[in-house]
Amino acid sequence: MGSLDGGGVQIPSKRSAHPLLRSSSRSERHSFSHRPRSRLARFLLFEKVDYLQWVCTVAVFCFVVILFQMFLPGSVTEKSGVPNAGNRDLAALKELGGLDFGEGVRFEPSKLMERFRKESRVVNSSSLSSRWPPVSRAALRRPQLALVLADLSMGPCQLLMTSVVLSLREIGYSIQVYALEDGQVHVVWRLIGVPVITLQNKTTSGVAIDWLNYDGVLVNSLEARDILSCLLQEPFKSIPVIWTIHERALAVRISDYISKGKTELLNHWKQVFNRATVVVFPNYFLPMIYSTFDAGNFFVIPGSPDEAWEADSFVASYRSEYTQVKMGYGPDDFVVVLAGSQFSYSGLWLEQSFVLQALAPLIPQFYSKNSSSAPFKVIVLSGDASSSYKLAIEVITEKLGYPRGSVEHIGIDADSNNYLNIADLVIYGSFLEEQSFPDILIRAMCYGKPIVAPDLAVIKKYVDDGVNGYLFPKENIGILTRVLFKAISNGKLSPLSRNVASIGNASCRNLRVSEVIEGYASLLENVLKFPSEVAQPKPFAEIPHQFRDEWQWKLFKDIIVHNYSSISFKSYSFLDKVEALLNSSATESAVAAKRREDVFSYTDWEEQKRTLMMIARKRREDDELKDRTDQPRGSWEEVYRNAKRADRAKNDLHERDDGELERTGQPLCIYEPYFGQGAWPFLHRYSLYRGVGLSTKGRRPGEDDVDAPSRLPLLNDPYYRNNLGEFGAFFAIASRIDRVHKNAWIGFQSWRAVARKASLSKASESALLAAIQVKRHGDAIYFWVRMDEDPRNPSQQDFWSFCDAINAGNCRFAVSEAFGRMYGLKHDWNSLPSMPVDGSTWSVMHSWVMPTRSFLEFVMFSRMFVDALDAQMYDEHHESGRCYLSLSKDRHCYSRVLELLVNVWAYHSARRMIYINPETGAMQVQHRLKNRRGQMWVRWFSYSTLKSMDEDLAEEFDSDHSVKRWLWPKTGEVFWQGVYERERNQRQRQKEKRKQQSKDKISRMRRRVRQKTIGKYVKPPPDDTSNSNSTATISTMAASE
């Protein structure tokens, strides 16, 4: 929210808690109390008041007395004849510069509106390249919306959403209602023909809804938090969400969360608020008190039936006379309620003082000759219920000559319904130019009370002076006395006032209905971006008047159950449950951590130390033995190859769990590609199926799902993961397929088919396995999701027309261009493979089964087709996010073309196409081979042609080492005959090199020059003959001499 950045966290109506609620003059001058807060009455809010606060309170009291001594008269009659005196006094006090009159109290959704303007400029100004064809809308189906309600119990929110849904349906929307709890309003939704589904399991993991079926989601109430948590997960993060909040309960607790350091609760709610595309509030007060959670997505559609519903419920539950006596007022008392703005600012008490001054001349009408006390009571319903504000009101009324006890101050946070119900006249005493009609005036009109209000722009829009209310100029307060004399005659309401109250009561029940309906229609128009097969909604002006001019009260008149204050009670109860849930989760985590810390006892620790010592001793012995033996280390290539082999063996061992062992003996394995946790409830968990996670982060824990990005690094790029969709899983499985898939047949099934209840049943699975084992149809493709039953194709168009409809009218052009680039044809070539209309149907949603060998051939064809398709779209789509296959920015540019590609390949490669009924397992041959003769492009799709093209691309990639961007090598393995020959030659050269090295070593050994021996070696005699030898040696030496 652009205008509330850095908002505070103090909750109920504290203008000082929000920096943008301060007057612009605050930056130039200080307030009279020299505090950054804007209220006079904030000194005594706390239970413990220290000495300094009491001193400040006395100072404020003296300041109020001085002001009124200077600018207010000593008696009322002195100024009763001067019409503009009040105006001059107000202007004089404003000149002092010490008070804030709320000029800065405004909410502007600047960031959100700027985003809308930017998107509008992009749509209007951006155009595709001139060489691309223009985009078009087919308008085959209505826009689909999901409405999520917390429950179906009676309440004003049900009335609001029922009225909005009926109006939206008139301009072309189709709406599905989801409710977390059932209730009485289920009858109403059934009566107006809106389908309702009650969610039995309300936990995040238990809500199994394919939100991708809807163009947008409307969420109502704080209690629908679990649904927003579901929409926080992939693949539902991109769905537009409009969240309407009426409750104040959470805002009241924000300060408590902050003061007690409950950061987990705050972060949780911030995450939920950030998920909503737009958070809608029914008035301008709620976004200000919720500013802590503002992420620039707050928006206001002013108006709701809350006030009228609350007044009706209160009147039906209480008797006015009994309530008046119980509250301490006599049955003959004339009660005037002086109401103020729900925004508090320091100048509010001054504005109310001038209203009290204008009201003072009416006091003599209520004096009785027999009684000294007047049955005239004024209830000041504004400000805070603090002693400081009450003290200021007492000083003001005493100076104005009001009888003691005739004026009572009630804080605006109190229950105002009791006071409005017993009032005879309601005066609005705030001159702040608010952005919407004050709710308290609507409530007063609904209670049948005449209202008197300043002629503010937003009030004059709905109140005609003397018709359904009284107006007085805010710049000339002296006229207010004349207006009051017109409204009150002889101590009672005048006949004119009773007529005004009656007219106001009739008009207030449907106040601002048209603005609310138009606000929601306009917001949906700005937020939602419809695919090309969706028809645009009609303009707001085409909504019939009976839907846009009044709330649908008549639908609820027979089942209304008055249960006053149950709505707020339910909100607080819900928050208690959320807090308990999060607190218990935190407690369990702390307990688990503590248990982990306490796992090792002293005995365990001693055993652990002995184990570590043994391991260290064994490692030392191994190191010593290793040093004593020769270690042939080989080359770095051999070391690298051994390491890779070890990693591969480790990965294979990791994947070979119980599911892998069960699949080993099966002829078929069906893979279910998915992206994110939101798809988990739709995935199967037995051996016939195996998940393929398109993202490493979103894989199911404890399951043997294939990690597609580890097998195909291209999927780590979000751009290609979004554009390829399920084709990313095809390429990942086909790459080094023998390491992950060892079955003769392979299949794929979209999790969205399971959500649509179009997946294979047990009976159809058995029938499919039986047909595969007996080879009933040979090399065939079995599919079970039909194109003619697709919700996107209600008119059952033919293949190419349907493809054009879901691709902005340019599917034929894209396929033709891709084939031309793929086969190297001329630029003016525009032919398309024939897909005839012969009474058969086609496959959609990537749900089919075929032989593994045929699958590899299909992937070989698809890799070249995707490369050609990507080459013509990448530059513009990657830079601007726009492509000619979509009407707006789209992350899934050509994924819808790829969805239908298997039909083109299967038809023209002469594969049998068999439709299997997903419920019964009955099989029906589609597009019989004898009827295809003369229409198939067999040579274009033959294995020999595709294999030669694949080898040519591999040879080009192998010989060209440029750094140009090329998608084809990244989608799978690169092999051609030259690769095998080069590897064989390399192995032969290595073998010859090793042989030559061995020969050279032997030759060097033979040519080595050896040194001749210097003398003979005489073995020394043993130790026991050492003496005899010595004697013999001496004798020999003597003889020689």
Image (tube, helix red, strand yellow):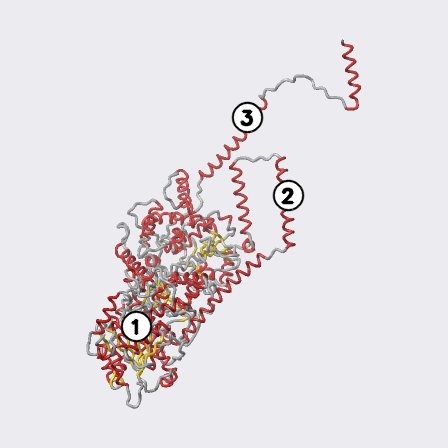
Q: Residue 804 carries which label?
A: none
Residue assigned mark 1: 65
Q: How crowded is mark 2: few (under 14 residues within 10 Å), some or many (20 or more)?
A: few
**200 or 367: nearer the viewer:** 367
Left or right side of 755 for 872: left
Amino acid type at mark 3: Asp
Residue assigned mark 3: 1000
Q: Residue furthest bottom?
A: 370
Left or right side of 730 for 59: left
What is the secondary structure assignment of the residue under circle 2?
A: helix
- Disc 1/disc 2 C-alpha distance (Å): 93 Å
Say if 522 sits above or below 721 in the image: below
Residue assigned mark 2: 618
**Identity of the residue drawn at 32% across and 45% down:** 825
Where's residue 735, x and y in %? 46, 47
Left or right side of 978 for 538: left
Amino acid type at mark 1: Val
Give yes or no for contact between labels 3 and 1 (Cβ–Cβ under 8 Å).
no
**Which is in the foreground here, disc 3 or disc 2?**
2
Say if 595 sits above or below 55 in the image: above
What is the secondary structure assignment of the residue under circle 3?
A: helix
Where's residue 674, x and y in %? 45, 57
Amino acid type at mark 2: Lys
Where's residue 1027, x and y in %? 79, 20
- Mark closest to the chain's N terminus, 3 or 1: 1
- Disc 3/disc 2 C-alpha distance (Å): 42 Å
Left or right side of 368 for 923: right
**Which is in the foreground here, disc 3 or disc 1?**
1
Q: Quadrant of the C terminus?
A: top right
Q: In which quarter of the image is residue 361?
A: bottom left
**Identity of the residue drawn at 40% across and 78% down:** 564
